[in-house]
Every structure is written in C-alpha cells, then in structure tokens.
Image: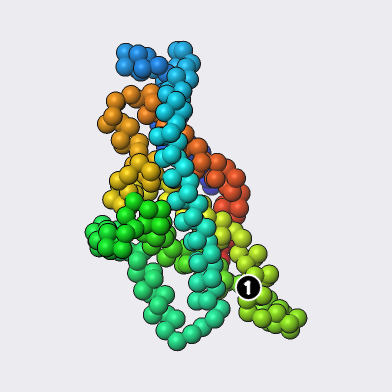
C-alpha cells in the first residue's frame, strides 16, 4: 500500500513537472529570443542566444515615445480597473453577506449572471453606447467594460469570504460602540485580506492581458494598451527580436505581481477550499 502511494506520488510529481515545462518553456524561449539579433533568429533556430545582444530593447526605447506610451496606457487602465474593483467588490460583498435587504438574492443573481454572459454578445452595444456619449478612445471607455467583466467574480469571492466570518466579531464591535461602516473598515476588511489579494491578482491578470475590449474600443495610439500594440508591431516590420522584447517587457508586471502575492494567494485559496 505504501509502495503504491509512493508510486502515485511520483507519477503526479512527474506529470506536474511536464505540464509546468509545457507552459514555462515558451516564455523562457521568448525571453532568450529577445536577446538575439535578427540574423540569428532567422538563420539559426537555437534555444540559447549564441551572442547576447540588447539591440531589440534599444530599438524599443529608441522609439520610446510610441511604445512606452502603450505600456503607460496599460498601467493606467489596469491600476484604475483593479483599484475600483477592490473597492466596489468589498463594499458589495459585505452588503450582500452582512446587510440583508429586499431583493438581495435577485440582484446578486443578476450580477452573477454576467459571469456566464459572453462578452461578444454585448461588445457591439457597448461600442454603440460609447460612440453616442463620446467615450471611445478614452481611458474611462476601456475601464468601464473591464469592470463589467471582472467585478461579478470579485463580488462573488468577497461575499463568500464575509459570509464565512463569525457574526460574533460584529457583535463584539457593536458592543464596543462601532457602527456598521466602522466594523467593516476596522474588523471585517482586514480579515478579508486574502480574498482581496485573490481579487487583485485575478483582476490584474484579466485586465493587463485583455485584448477584445481594447481592440474594439481603442484605435488611437494615445490610448491603445500593449496587448493590442503587440499585434501592430508584428504587422509593421515582422522583427521577431523586437516583438519578443516587447512581449518580455509586457509579461514582467504580471509575473512580479504573482511573485509578490503568491504566499497570500495560495493561503487564501487553501482557506477557501477548506471552508468549502
């Protein structure tokens, strides 16, 4: 029995290692390609660069007025979307979990219905509405549809977290003279830190790499995010080294966010699975 358990554990470990390599190797290959010169990329298909070169990154920074603007646009859209999502999901999740009101379940059902609603079905109406009110090619015009995509899931996460918390915490706060907003800010919200991190990381990933909304609602360079700009870069000169360098720069922020919050993220997911 113990031998079978060890064999199964070894099989799972090897399987996870193989799956991890399938996902990691393309990223590593892209990073190495960004340090190759164009002639090496075209003539010799090698994994490691034979001659390390920063010419591709130099090309991007030399044309910084154009490409760095794409990164700035992405940062603005992502940070604003995630910040608004954190605030609204925390408030809404607490209200749905701890402040029952008439129509609570109906409103929550309508919000969660958006999770199963395809984006392509509402993208054209969104475009027409933004065209009428002048929000096309604006930061707000991209942020609002992104909120529509990530906010329902975030509310669901926060509501589940607040429901699992003991009501004795609020009772003790009320005895100490705290009202509902004070109990939320000083007691409930700090205890929901892991859930907030899940919302932050998932929201950051979804908005940073989002393509469909940005491609539809942002056609000007002054507002275009990097996810759309990468396709333009490819069609412009087919310089794979420059494209690899731009992709490498674009994946640094998501990797950094995950590296910073990975412990809290895993802790929050583990706690959720135990409670479930």
Task: Residue lying at the far front in this picture: please name it.
Answer: 134
Front-lying residue, 81 or 25: 81
Front-lying residue, 208 or 167: 208
Crowd band around label 1 with a 10 angstrom C-alpha radius: few (<14), some (14–19), many (20+): many
Above/below status of 108 relative to 272? below
The scheme the figure's colours follow is rainbow
Relative placement, left or right, of 112 versus 275 is left
Relative placement, left or right, of 102 versus 124 is right
Front-lying residue, 13 or 6: 13
- Quadrant of the rendered image containing residue 258: top right
In percent of width and height, residue 35 lies at 45, 21
Above/below status of 123 relative to 18? below
At 70% from the left and 79% from the top, the residue drawn is: 178
Task: Residue lying at the far bottom in this picture: please name it.
Answer: 102
Secondary structure beneath dot 1 equals helix
Above/below status of 156 relative to 11? below
In percent of width and height, residue 164 lies at 57, 71
At 32% from the left and 55% from the top, the residue drawn is: 136
Task: Residue lying at the far right in this picture: please name it.
Answer: 176
Is any part of residue 155 visible from this angle?
Answer: yes
At 66% from the left and 81% from the top, the residue drawn is: 179
Is any part of residue 21 visible from this angle?
Answer: no
At 27% from the left and 63% from the top, the residue drawn is: 132
In percent of width and height, residue 124 lies at 24, 59
Mark 1 lies on residue:
184
How many labels sit on residues?
1
Relative placement, left or right, of 30 versus 187 is left
In percent of width and height, residue 200 lies at 52, 55
């Amino acid at each position: 029995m113990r031998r079978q358990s060890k064999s199964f554990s070894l099989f799972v470990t090897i399987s996870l290692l193989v799956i991890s390599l399938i996902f990691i190797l393309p990223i590593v290959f892209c990073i190495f390609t960004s340090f190759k010169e164009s002639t090496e990329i075209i003539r010799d298909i090698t994994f490691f660069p034979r001659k390390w070169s920063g010419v591709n990154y130099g090309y991007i920074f030399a044309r910084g007025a154009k490409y760095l603007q794409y990164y700035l646009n992405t940062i603005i859209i992502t940070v604003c979307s995630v910040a608004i999502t954190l605030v609204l999901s925390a408030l809404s999740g607490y209200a749905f979990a701890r402040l029952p009101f008439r129509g609570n379940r109906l409103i929550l059902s309508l919000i969660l219905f958006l999770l199963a609603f395809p984006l392509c079905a509402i993208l054209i109406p969104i475009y027409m509405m933004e065209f009428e009110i002048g929000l096309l090619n604006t930061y707000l015009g991209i942020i609002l549809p992104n909120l529509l995509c990530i906010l329902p899931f975030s509310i669901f996460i926060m509501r589940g977290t607040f429901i699992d918390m003991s009501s004795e915490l609020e009772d003790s706060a009320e005895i100490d003279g705290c009202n509902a907003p004070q109990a939320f800010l000083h007691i409930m919200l700090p205890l929901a830190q892991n859930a907030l991190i899940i919302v932050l990381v998932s929201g950051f990933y979804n908005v940073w790499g989002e393509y469909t909304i940005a491609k539809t609602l942002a056609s000007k360079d002054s507002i275009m995010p990097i996810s759309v700009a990468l396709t333009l870069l490819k069609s412009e000169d087919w310089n794979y080294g420059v494209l690899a360098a731009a992709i490498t720069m674009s994946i640094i922020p998501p990797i950094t966010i995950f590296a910073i919050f990975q412990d809290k993220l895993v802790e929050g997911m583990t706690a959720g699975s135990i409670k479930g």
